[in-house]
Image: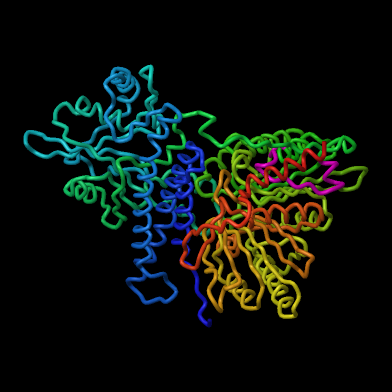
């Protein structure tokens, strides 16, 4: 096959979100977890309209003005809207089916598009008049000033009223940003859960006494989330981003989502008043922002996943400390199956150890109550040189990162921000110790963020090592990052152990794939296994196609975006793709090259996306320790055998079931048990 083909990036992502929705419908999943998957689906959809839809709309506009074969067809916007609308209908069906189960199994009655029962109306009214009413700000459309428009993803009610035989449209805000989305009340027999907007609906006539309320319909506007940061190097970048964050919720509209059965004249009034002609106009259900289902006030262990054991690595007493142990041997942590406390201990020991002189770390998404940042503050106050590279452009985490940056800086930590056009996405740390007048460096390399909050539900690998070559190159990388310059001459920095985007990462991966091609052509064993979140970059995909045509067996585990089309004769017939969606979010990047029965194993922060390869500083790192390498190979093997939570991606972008060959295997459960057995064997 001479023509090289690729899946559309955005339709591929929508395919992943549809996979999330499948879990919400999965009867094997505990009820509250199914509700959580509904929440994740809703949140993902909102982000798509905030982040990707603006880009698609811009491309569509450009495509209408010029003929460019490299632009996606303008039908991508329409196809994306069609698929999302179809999925939303499925979403509503799943939620309606869950409601009776929630009452039957948990005794909770979620009032979904039903009136407030008479038995609890007095309590609901008291809550409304004492807690809710203060936040309501009704606005008559006829009297609205042009300066008002709905903020991003905030819920409003469009009220249809009769005013002396004349139709009147009134906007009433739903203050779910200030009050809980759900109110719980019991009548002694049943625990009712009521949406905040339904409480407001129940009292609309009292809120609007001068008109006769006929009906109300919820709506929300989704707005572009991009920050307009100029390509410049001078000035206070943090201050610029803070100003842009303040404007983010007032960006141009990408979607109007309106309630079912809204009258056409009411919809037209909203579109006209808020200048939404260019937005995607989509009919939704009665309720919006159902990402709030994650905060549903139900806490019943029976309705959730059973707890799996989580063990903490304990240093061998002969080493006296974790840092000493790392100096003698490599340690791997598999979060969240193993406790993230090992990473916290790494930083805590570094903060207090009298031998530690300097600490360097990159922080991409800082936890809101970060213990790591706290230990770095302590380290600085303990007289150590602490240098922290903070990524200010981590989408939706900018404000939190800026907040912590100021705290760290006030404590004496040297803060270095990445330059506007080059994100630092690497997850690395270096601790410099001086023992008996000799330097002893230890380092941390991760596939995920140094964030104790996300480490509870993101699967990631963290390698703690003192490998001299890796430490020397890590130190070299930190020196470069401190200069805050784009790598105009990458050859000035030499990396032979680490793979660093902008320097040698893409080139080295191409070489590793080529080695498998050469082995296959020589009749030697050849194979590639890659696990990542997203696969988009066409040069690397093209090389995988070439390897497939050479007879190399390629097995991919790609959670989300995947532009590679598998199973196409003459192009990708030796490539299979799996997705795993389960209780934890699969997040590691793992690269395994067969190497004639002597596997090369790499971990890292880099997906194969255009942004990761060309516009970020990423670090992938080798696994040299034989025992750790075998451990990782076994974990990946379990994931390749998953026939319960994994699906196969076919060449039509569909999530298809994995054949149930042999015993059922749920990889996350199997990995948990494997690591649990390993822990028990060390006792």
Front residue of 366/300: it is 300
Q: Is residue 236 visible?
A: no
Range shown magenta: 323-341
In the picture, measured across the screen, residue 431 lies left or right of residue 510, that is right
Among the 4 quarters of the image, the one containing residue 79 = bottom left
Q: Position of residue 93 (x, y in %)?
A: 36, 45
Residue at the location (45% across, 74% down)? 70
Is 233 magenta? The answer is: no
Among the 4 quarters of the image, the one containing residue 212 = top left
Image color mode: rainbow
Identify whether 415 is placed above or below 124. below
Identify whether 15 is placed above or below 163. below
Identify whether 474 is placed above or below 303. below
Q: Position of residue 661 (x, y in %)?
A: 60, 57
Is 340 magenta? The answer is: yes
Q: Is residue 548 visible?
A: yes
Which residue, as the protein is rendered here, is positioned at the far bottom? Answer: 2
In the picture, measured across the screen, residue 9 lies left or right of residue 159, that is right
Which residue, as the protein is rendered here, is positioned at the far right? Answer: 436
In this rendering, the count of numbered labels is: 0
In the picture, measured across the screen, residue 683 lies left or right of residue 617, that is right
In the picture, measured across the screen, residue 33 lies left or right of residue 670, that is left
Q: Position of residue 28 (x, y in %)?
A: 51, 43
Residue at the location (59% across, 72% down)? 539
Front residue of 545/156: it is 545
Among the 4 quarters of the image, the one containing residue 321 = top right
């Amino acid at each position: 096959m001479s023509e090289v083909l690729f899946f559309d990036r955005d339709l591929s992502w929508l395919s992943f979100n549809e996979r999330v929705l499948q879990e919400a419908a999965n009867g094997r999943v505990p009820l509250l977890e199914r509700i959580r998957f509904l929440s994740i689906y809703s949140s993902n959809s909102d982000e798509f309209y905030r982040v990707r839809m603006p880009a698609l709309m811009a491309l569509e506009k450009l495509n209408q003005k010029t003929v460019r074969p490299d632009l996606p067809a303008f039908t991508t916007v329409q196809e994306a809207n069609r698929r999302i609308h179809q999925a939303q209908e499925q979403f509503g069906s799943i939620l309606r089916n869950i409601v009776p189960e929630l009452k039957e199994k948990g005794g909770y009655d979620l009032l979904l598009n039903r009136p407030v029962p008479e038995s609890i109306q007095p309590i609901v009214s008291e809550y409304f008049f004492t807690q809710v009413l203060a936040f309501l700000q009704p606005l008559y459309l006829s009297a609205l000033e042009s300066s008002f428009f709905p903020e991003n993803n905030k819920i409003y009610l469009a009220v249809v009223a009769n005013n002396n035989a004349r139709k009147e449209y009134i906007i009433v805000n739903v203050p779910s940003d200030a009050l809980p989305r759900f109110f719980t009340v019991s009548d002694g027999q049943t625990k009712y859960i009521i949406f905040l907007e339904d409480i407001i609906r129940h009292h609309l006539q009292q809120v609007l006494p001068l008109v006769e309320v006929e009906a109300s319909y919820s709506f929300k506007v989704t707005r572009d989330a991009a920050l307009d940061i100029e390509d410049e190097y001078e000035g206070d970048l943090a201050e610029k981003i803070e100003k842009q964050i303040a404007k983010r919720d007032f960006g141009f509209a990408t979607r109007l989502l309106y309630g079912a059965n809204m009258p056409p004249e009411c919809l037209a009034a909203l579109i006209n008043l808020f200048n939404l002609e260019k937005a995607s106009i989509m009919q939704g259900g009665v309720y919006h922002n159902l990402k709030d289902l994650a905060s549903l006030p139900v806490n019943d262990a029976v309705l959730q996943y059973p707890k799996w054991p989580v063990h903490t690595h304990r240093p061998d007493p002969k080493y006296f400390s974790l840092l000493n142990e790392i100096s003698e041997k490599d340690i791997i942590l598999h979060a969240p199956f193993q406790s993230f406390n090992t990473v916290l201990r790494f930083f805590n020991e570094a903060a207090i150890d009298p031998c530690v002189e300097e600490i360097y770390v990159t922080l991409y998404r800082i936890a809101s109550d970060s213990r790591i940042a706290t230990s770095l503050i302590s380290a600085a106050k303990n007289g150590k040189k602490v240098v922290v590279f903070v990524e200010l452009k981590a989408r939706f985490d900018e404000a939190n990162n800026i907040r912590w940056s100021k705290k760290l800086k006030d404590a004496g930590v040297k803060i270095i921000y990445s330059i506007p056009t080059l994100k630092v996405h690497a997850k690395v740390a270096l601790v410099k110790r001086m023992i008996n007048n000799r330097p002893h460096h230890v380092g941390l390399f991760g596939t995920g963020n140094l964030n104790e909050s996300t480490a509870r539900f993101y699967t990631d690998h963290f390698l703690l090592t003192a490998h001299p070559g890796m430490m020397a190159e890590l130190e070299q990388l930190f020196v470069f990052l401190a200069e805050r310059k784009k790598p105009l001459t990458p050859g000035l920095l030499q990396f032979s152990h680490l793979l660093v985007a902008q320097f040698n990462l893409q080139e080295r991966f191409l070489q590793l794939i080529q080695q498998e091609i050469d082995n296959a052509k020589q009749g030697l064993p050849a194979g590639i296994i890659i696990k990542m979140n997203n696969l988009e970059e066409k040069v690397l995909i093209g090389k995988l196609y070439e390897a497939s045509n050479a007879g190399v067996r390629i097995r991919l585990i790609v959670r989300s975006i995947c532009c590679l089309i598998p199973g196409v004769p003459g192009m990708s017939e030796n490539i299979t793709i799996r997705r795993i969606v389960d209780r934890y979010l699969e997040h590691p990047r793992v690269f395994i090259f067969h190497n004639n029965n002597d596997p090369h194993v790499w971990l890292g922060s880099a997906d194969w996306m255009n942004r990761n390869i060309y516009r970020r500083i990423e670090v992938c790192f080798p696994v040299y320790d034989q025992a750790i390498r075998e451990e990782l190979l076994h974990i990946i093997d379990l994931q390749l055998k998953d026939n319960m939570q994994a699906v196969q991606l076919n060449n039509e972008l569909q999530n298809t079931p994995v054949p149930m060959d042999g015993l059922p295997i749920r990889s996350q459960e199997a990995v948990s048990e494997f690591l649990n057995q390993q822990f028990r064997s060390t006792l």
